Image (tube, helix red, strand yellow):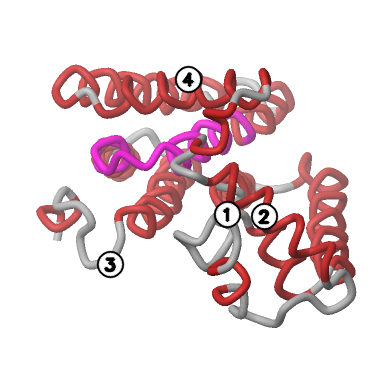
Amino acid sequence: TWMETFQNPSIFMQFNHFGYYLCLVTMAFGALFMAEEKSGLIAWLWLAGFALASAALVLNSAIGPVVAVVGGLILGGVFYSVQDRQNPGQGIFRRTLISAAVFILVAVVVNVAVGFLGRDLAQLSSDIGNIARGSDKAQSAGSGRWLLWQNGARFAWEKPLFGYGPDNLGARYAVSTASFSDRPHNELIQIAASLGIPAMLFYLSGLIAHLKLFLTLHQRLDRLTIGIFAMIGAYLISSLF
């Protein structure tokens, strides 16, 4: 139910997992709003769902999925703009602006009410600054993710061909400087450390092949397909954090 959606972490065991789910739900509502050809009741219901999912996402206080949705909206907006120029008069770019405005408005309103997003963005900015300066405080950046990434990258080079095995990094992390977790919280590092660097390169090559095909065909794709592509892009961004 919608009430469960606003009860963090809903049915999930951890609020980050709920955030990943809300990232996909928010992007899915946005894609359905963009795909609805008529500007009638159904389109506005999809937009209402997008607004509610955005509110739940900001309330969840997991900054990674929020950044992912912003990235996904920008990605979709770029290709919707191209499609709008090819099909003038259909209001595609106008809907893109409406989606962006609704997300920004919801984020501002929820932040004014609870303050989570402003706090998290300030912390993110501080963490990036600490990493750039090489400060000792960088070890705690991203709730410790920077330390997890550094250790995970080192583990990948320790066993570069086949890694430590699927979901088998717990023992290695337990004797590292990042013993508070059993995984790097970054999809690419996770694959490299668990399955080996070649596996990570194969995974990247698959993504690049799909991206290349999309770039070749995007001018002929419908609005829903572009929205799904943006949704996948948001998921990939989320998976890195």
The amino acid sitting under disc 1 is: Thr
Label 1 neighbour load within 10 Å: few <14, some 14-19, many 20+: few
Q: Quadrant of residue 135?
A: top right
Q: Answer yes or no: do the residues labelled 4 and 1 have beta carbons within 8 Å?
A: no
Q: Which residue is mark 4?
A: 97
Give me the residue at 30% from left, 35% from top. 58
Q: Answer yes or no: do the residues labelled 1 and 3 have beta carbons within 8 Å?
A: no
Tell me: 219 left or right of 32.
right
Question: Disc number at residue 13?
Answer: 3
Residue 164 located within the stretch drawn in magenta: no
Q: Secondary structure at mark 4?
A: helix
Q: Which residue is mark 2?
A: 151
Give me the residue at 59% from left, 52% from top. 148
The amino acid sitting under disc 4 is: Leu
155 w.r.t. 165: above or below: above
Q: Which residues are magenta?
A: 54-75
Q: Secondary structure at mark 2?
A: helix
Please report whichever mark, 2 or 1, sits nearer to the chain's N-terminal start.
2
**Residue 151 location, x and y as percent?**
67, 55
Q: Nearer the viewer, mark 3 or mark 4?
A: 3
